[in-house]
Image (cartoon, coloured by chain):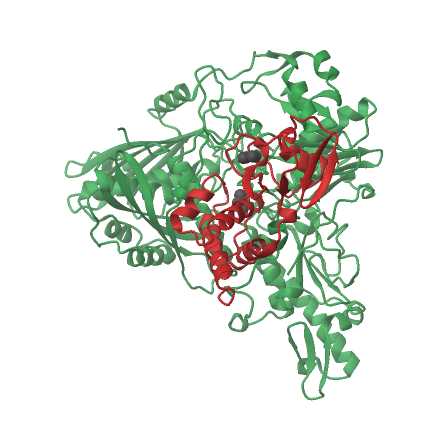
Amino acid sequence: MARLTVNGSSKSIDVAPDTSLLSALRDVLNLTGTKYGCGIAQCGACTVLVNGDAVQACQAYVGDLGDAEITTIEGLSGPIGDALKAAWLTHDATECGHCQPGQIMRAAALLAETPDPDDAAIRTAMNGNLCRCGTYGRIHAAIRTAATSLSDPAKG
Amino acid sequence: MTMTNHRPRPDRTPAPDAPSRRTLLRVMMGTGAGLTLGLVLPGSEPAAAADGDNTTDAGSADLAPNAFVRLARDGRVTVICKHLEMGQGVYTGLCALVAEELDAPWDSVHPAPAPADAALYNNLYWGPLQGTGASTSLANAFEQMRRAGAVARAMLVRAAAEAWDVPPDEIETTDGRLRHAAGDRSAGYGEMAAAAAALPVPDPDTVPLKDPATFRLIGRVDLHRPDAAAKIDGSALYASDIRLPGMLVARIRRPPRFGATVKSVNTEAALAVPGVKAVTPLPAGAGLAVVAEMPWQTARALAVLAVEWDDSATVTTGTDAILERYREQAKTPGTVVRNQGDAAAALTKPDSVAIEATYDVPYQAHAPMETPSAVAHLTDSGIEIWTASQTPTTDVLAVAEAARVDPARVTLHPTFAGGSFGLRARPDGGCARDVAAIARALAEQGIGAPVQLVWTREDEIRGGWYRPMALHTVSGAVDANGRPTAWRHRVVCQSILKGTVFEGPLMGDGIDPTCVEGVADLPYAVPNMYLDLHMPETGVPVLWWRAGGHSHTAFATESFVDELAHAAGTDPLALRLDLLRDAHPDMLNVLLLVADKAGWAAPLAPGRGRGLAVHRSRGTSVAQVAEVTVKDSTIVVDRVVCAVHCGLPVNPSVIRAQVEGAIVFGLSAALRGRITMDDTGAVEQSNFHNFEVLRMAAVPDIEVHILPSTAAPTGIGEPALPPVAPAVANAVFAATGTRLRSLPLRLKG
Ligand code: FES
Ligand code: FES
């Protein structure tokens, strides 16, 4: 038995401590918005927030998480989450969508730390998140739009 | 606009028996690929339309005039989409076509995937097959979907006319409302749906369509994708996200080399792992599946599964040796594909300059972000499959065979695809077939639970079904005036179609069109033009990949025309404009536009270069200018300017996204990824650390210019890919004087 705090609620799950967070979310808790893309820290499709930091869930293990606050795409809320989701829609940033929950979670961590990221900051932060459909330009623009709307809601 | 995403209902009853679809398919395929099946009969009902898993619930539809449109009492319109949404935005396009002619507000329109039913949902360009690919979706469905919407509108108008006792031509429709201006009556579509449903369905072939000048949705730049919201909040369901009660999971062990089969297996240790239920064979002896309650249990079991492989048919050659063999083969004549004038004679004319060049491209994996996945539930009444399929018609047959059930008892629930790029169009049924075989093997052990197969990334990268490796040897001559007089082209490329169900209908003359498309129809006005083809066998499974054969033919043709320009001392733009004088005028127009937008003639700093390419595929003309910086032998692509002519731009935002996406995908192959095999035949790549694709930091500025047009729409998912690699190679030549003829492009340090 292990405990995880996911999207604000504490869950007890019957898995070994070396179970990956990705598997715990997808296979045990049915939170399938977090995606598998590589399993080896190369694609970012599995990105979630752990105490606000972007973490690749395929590289985190249930036994190490203690009472850390885990946020998945299903639980992303608040001004940053809302601004990102709105900007993603405005820029039609999704194609197949499979990378997008991870992209949005990574962007949420970026904006929490750097409210007004420049081009280089965005490229550096997002470089671990692959998009095989090639939506990078739109993701980049959506992050800028979200940042602008957060700093000046009138412009968002 | 939102989409609801229902969890699948496992209690669905299979359709009643019907004639075997295998027989039907064979009969239909035998009549030739050009055969077009009759359109949907007016009033016909799809068997289980709108019953798929990403669907809005269309069960409450009050008006269902054809296989594509449902109108509910609350005014909600469901568009049943016959093509797979795999990121290319086809739902947006199909919905816009219906909503345009129906005069429905965009927010009222919701896409739903069509079930597998080729009689209703065939691709009009593919005869009797239902399927998505080769950038045909919007083009084949353009008129069909408009007519489907127009029929519904005509019925609503007639219903209102009868209810209000006024002539139908006095009734106007806007934004989901009917209005009789003179009589001051109006009603929402939903209110009139039931009355309309009682009327006879007009003939779709004669129902009037709008004058394009009055379009209000088609061509609009701010029409957002109806599938976006679900993909942004994480609720969109892909096959890997399906969770059914009691569902088991399967992971596979494939042979370490292509062609090997299972000789013997010791399952004892694997079956002893807690949670593991079974070890089952995959079709054709090509590996095993471990089935367990949870994925981590399968991983543990696979680690202790002892398999001995039968290597009697194993591929034990590396890609270097295969390429060497191709080079040898390129010295001998192949099957003639095209022959105008006398290229051999023109090449040896004394006053000409002749050049020769050889280009090669490697095997390529598709690497969609979602690996192939499928769920099967086999019961006494049939088999249900949840998967994303580009080719439902052939997948249903493959599933039926693997599960040993009648094809009429296969129910396919389409899910979103997390990318595909051709991978979910395997003629043998791929992952869906494999999960069906696993379900059958489980049933034989008394296990009736649903089972989900998800490939790991390693399974996908190492598993074959690659874009074929190809070698092109091209010779050309320019005369004393700098005019090209001869073009002799030889392609060595494995056939994709050979040995598949498509060989008969599509390879009648023994030539696989996917090996030569783009050069067989090269539009350059060179008087002596010759093309021949070798189709060697290698044992490596190959498949269509984004842009098919164009993905390599354009690299050869657009690099070589650049080489000819330099041999002739002509500007590469000027030479192309001259050679395209007899070609489709769109090609000239995209070239002129891209040259203007990119500032073709403007000087660049040392170490920088500009390269041009133009190519026509899927009826669409695309020209690109790439700007590169070369520093310390590293190629950085700074900017790609693209002009595209794809007929009437139905959804400009989707067109832009597809062009940007194809450029990024093409750049990944031009600069990064490739699949190689070592000299024992083992694939050397396994995941994104060694099969590299473009990341955000390396993405250039991309500018897309869409030419206005009123012609029927043509393909857009692929055509922007082929010009990228040659444009970059030509830019590298401009920057450095070094001609790169191998993909991925690498400068020696
Ligand atoms: S699945 Fe975790 S980084 Fe790719
Ligand atoms: S949207 Fe398909 S991988 Fe990013």
Give the residue at the far front of this rendering: A67
Q: Which chain is green?
A: B
The percent position of residue B584, horizontal first and vertical second, equals: 38, 55
Q: Nearer the viewer, residue B109 or B320?
A: B109
Q: Nearer the viewer, residue B321 or B455?
A: B455
> Quarter of the image containing the N terminus of chain B?
bottom right
Q: Quadrant of residue B414?
A: top right
Q: Is residue B426 above or below residue A118?
A: above
**Shown colour of chain A:** red
Q: Is residue B74 left or right of residue B474?
A: right
The percent position of residue B680, horizontal first and vertical second, equals: 47, 14
Q: Is residue A136 left or right of residue B37?
A: left
Q: Nearer the viewer, residue B158 or A151?
A: A151
> Quarter of the image containing the C terminus of chain B?
top left
The percent position of residue B348, horizontal first and vertical second, equals: 20, 33
Q: Residue at x 71, y 40 (%)?
A: A30
